[in-house]
Image (cartoon, rainbow, N blue to C red):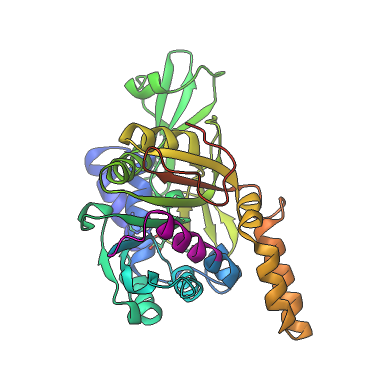
Amino acid sequence: MTAVADRLAQRIRIAGPISVADYMEEVGAFYYAARDPLGGTGDFITAPEVSQIFGELIGLWCAELWQRLGAPDPVLLVELGPGRGTLMADALRAARIVPGFGQALRLHLVEHSPVLRAKQGEVLGAHAPHWHDSTATLPPGPMLLVANEFLDALPIRQFERRASGWHERRIGLDAGGARFVFMLEPTPSPLGTQLPRAPEGTIAELSPATAALGRAVGARLAREGGAALFIDYGYFPSACGDTFQALRRHRTHAVLEEPGSADLTAHVDFAAFAAAARAGGAVVFGPVTQAAFLARLGLTARAAMLLRRASAAQAASIRSACRRLIDPAEMGDLFKVLALGQKGAAMPSGFDEVVS
Ligand code: SAH
């Protein structure tokens, strides 16, 4: 058993079965605390690790928005879950072409993993980043916030529809006490009122942690100004289904096997996130697909520039990276982009409609 499995088993023996959210939170903290899970030799790969163009376009998006906001100085540039710091390094390099932005920005990174904080320090040290455990400790002032593949790591709770209502799914131990198993709370959950009607056996998910973040960021933007950009895999509108998954070395892994050895995530319910941000006081743009967003931001033109200076081998890898980002069969469709702003804000680049 992994150390976190021992801890979870002990907790269950003492206090009974735990929610999927408690399991995700405890396993996730352990998983990220000790490793860099990204890249070819890790468990999964993300868009900024696929191509530098991804971070560059986001950097230009931020710099353009900063100008539109009236070039506030100072401005907080915040990233949630920066991983290896690749997105931010590419973004800052590209944004240098916008005069004044580099001097105005104060870099704040929300990251709980000491291993990844160290990596971020290596690539972003020149920008003197400040680290935070959560958004709660960010200093006041206008901010530009980006988060790629952050929301999918936040804990979800799961429910199963029975004749009597929605029952919360919990994780306990089997009769032998050696394996983690799903079980159902015997009485219906009061949270069932937030879930739709569905046939018996249906699984549905709620993420109080994601909603709380949406409300907090929305309220902060309403109060202090700025904008936020969230990119993640997920769905819109809200829907039922089991999206809890584990990835280990780029393959799906059973979520309850060897906890702590694989990355645990869930798809993001963008409609629920948008509703929470709106309740906090922000205006919501999108979501649009990652393919549409990157196309509007000029992915093709940027790739063409890189191709001009590329060797044949480099050209092939640039083309395949771009395909990976925008192909509907890869990241193009499943990944979605949502922006938040202050009420009355003009639509940011890359979006085509205001949902609220
Ligand atoms: N944005 C990066 C990394 C995505 S992986 C990229 O696109 O490559 C998820 C990141 O979020 C990691 O940096 C992880 O350590 C961080 N993270 C996950 N849950 C977190 C939490 N609750 N608080 C702070 N950071 C978290």
The residue lying toward the viewer, choosing from 145 and 67, is 67
- Residue 89 position, x and y percent, is 45, 74
Q: Quadrant of residue 307?
A: bottom right
Query: Measuring 38% from the left and 18% from the top, which residue is drawn there?
Result: 193
- Residue range in magenta is 57-73
Quadrant location, the N terminus:
bottom left
- Residue 39 position, x and y percent, is 54, 71
Classify residue 328 as left or right of residue 2.
right
- Residue 65 position, x and y percent, is 44, 56
Classify residue 215 as left or right of residue 349.
left
Q: Is residue 182 visible?
A: no
Quadrant location, ligand no. 1: bottom left
Q: Residue furthest top?
A: 164
Count the numbered circles shown.
Answer: 0
Query: Measuring 50% from the left and 49% from the top, which residue is drawn there?
Result: 348
The residue lying toward the viewer, choosing from 66 and 133, is 66
Relative height, residue 72 to residue 343 (above, below):
below
Q: Residue furthest right?
A: 312
- Queried whether the magenta region covers residue 208, the answer comes back as no
Q: Residue furthest front?
A: 70
- Residue 98 position, x and y percent, is 46, 70
Query: Measuring 53% from the left and 41% from the top, which residue is drawn there?
Result: 286
Q: Is residue 93 visible?
A: yes
Majority secondary structure of the magenta segment? Answer: helix
Query: Measuring 60% from the left and 52% from the top, which residue is drawn there?
Result: 293
